[in-house]
Amino acid sequence: MESEIIGWELFLWIAIDQTLDQLGGVDIAAAAAILPGQPFLPTRGKFAGATRGTSIASVVSRKILQQRMPFALPTLTGASLRTLRLTFTRSLGAFVGRLVPGVGWTVLAYDVFQIINQSITKYNALAKKEDRLW
C-alpha cells in the first residue's frame, strides 16, 4: 500500500513538472483564441434555434473580411458542446470568426495529451517494473 501511495505521489509531481514544461506562450494564444470566440455580445435578432449572441471574433472578422464565397463553408456553432452543431456560411468573415475558438480548443487538447503522455513516459522510466503504468 505504501509503495502505491509513493508511486502516485511520484506520478503527480512528474505531471506537475510536465505541465509547467508544456504550458507557455502558445497556451496563452490558445486561451486568447477561445475567449473572444464565446457569444458574449448581444444581437438584434436571430432565427429560432440559433445560438444567442455573437462573439468578438465574429464581429471583428466580419468587418475585416467582407468577402462572400461562391460556395458555403462548414462551421461549428453553439455556446457549449451540448449545443454544438454544424452550419454553413458563405461569409468568409463568419467562417474565420467561428474557426478561431476551435483552433484554441485544439491547441489546448493537444497540450493535455502531451502532458499526460510525457508524464506516463517519464514515470515509467523512473518507477519499479511492477509500479509502471500501461
Image: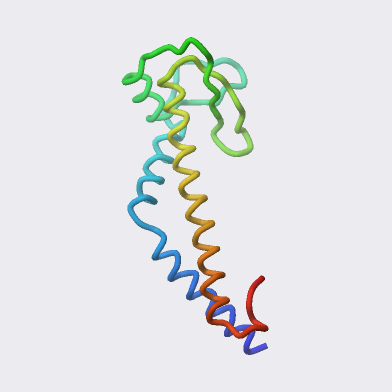
Q: In x, y percent, where is residue 53?
A: 48, 26
**Front-lying residue, 59 or 100:** 100
Residue at the limit of the structure toward the bottom, as seen here: 2
User: Residue 118: image x %, image y %?
Assistant: 51, 66
Residue 58 occupies quadrant: top left
Identify the coloring: rainbow
Q: Is residue 106 above or below residue 77?
A: below
Q: Is residue 4 left or right of residue 66?
A: right
How many numbered marks appear?
0
Which quarter of the rendering shows the N terminus?
A: bottom right
Q: Residue at x 42, y 28 (%)?
A: 97
**Quadrant of the frame with the C terminus:** bottom right
Left or right: 3 in relation to 31: right
In the rendered view, would you say 1 is above or below 51?
below
- The percent coordinates of residue 33 (x first, y second) are 40, 40
Question: Residue drawn at (46%, 35%), measured in percent from left and top?
Answer: 38
Q: Position of residue 114 (x, y in %)?
A: 50, 59
Residue appearing at x 52%, y 20% in the figure? 73
In terms of depth relative to the viewer, which is nearer, 70 or 35? 70
Q: Image height check: is 90 above or below 54?
A: above
Q: Nearer the viewer, residue 2 or 49?
A: 2
Query: In the image, what residue occupies the spot 57% across and 38% down?
Result: 80
